Amino acid sequence: MTLGLINANPVVHAKKERVARTEDPHGDDAVDPLEIYDFVRDIRDPEHPYSLEQLSVLSEESITVDEKLGRILITFTPTIQHCSMATVIGLCLRVKLQHCFPPHYKVDIKVSPGSHANEESVNKQLNDKERVAAALENPNLRQLVDECLYSNEL
């Protein structure tokens, strides 16, 4: 780990056992919260060598799906209220979901109410297509997102 961590001693939880699925997850294009959770739970935290699941940044209960409206809502909880990596975590979630789910779903990503000092600003950044596209054009930020998504260190 590097010096100057914002949350130097995060609480680390055990990983949950994966639920075995026998059917094709995209067979009928239906999406359920557990399926989404299985895709995003292993994203590595940008600051620590732990997954978002291990740090309880997200859970199965923090994901909702509205099939009728074609909407997915992921609400995550940063480990501390002034987490500077909240937008990076949100970008990681968005990029991962773009690669895994049908494009007709509208994905909203938000920090849990009251869990971040700049909640409104973070939510606005994470759900503005132009801001997300601009952030992902930044090579350093894109590299950090890719490291969180494709790290095998967990």
Image (cartoon, rainbow, N blue to C red):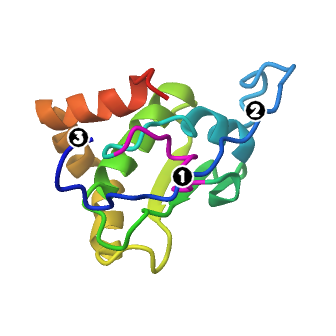
Look at label 1 and name its amino acid. Answer: Val
Look at label 2 and name its amino acid. Answer: Arg
In the image, is 146 to the left or to the right of 66?
left
Give the alpha-carbon distance from disc 3 to disc 2, as whole Å: 32 Å
Query: Nearer the observer, disc 3 or disc 2?
Result: 2
Magenta stretch: includes residue 51: yes
Return the disc, 1 or 3, that comes first in the chain's sequence: 1
> Is 24 rendered above or below residue 109?
above
The one of 3 and 94 positioned closer to us in this rendering: 3
Q: Secondary structure at mark 3?
A: helix
Return the disc, 2 or 1, that comes first in the chain's sequence: 1
Q: Position of residue 127 (x, y in %)?
A: 36, 56
Q: Tell me, yes or no, whether the two marked residues, 1 and 3, touch with CB atoms within 8 Å.
A: no
Return the disc, 3 or 2, that comes first in the chain's sequence: 2
> Is 2 rendered above or below residue 68?
above
The one of 19 and 94 positioned closer to us in this rendering: 19
Q: Position of residue 60 (x, y in %)?
A: 69, 51
Where does the magenta region start and end?
Answer: 48-58
| Residue 18 image label | 2
Image quadrant containing the N terminus? top left
Residue where numbered disc 3 is placed? 133
Residue where numbered disc 1 is placed? 12
Give the alpha-carbon distance from disc 2 to disc 1, as whole Å: 18 Å
**Residue at left 47%, top 26%?**
99
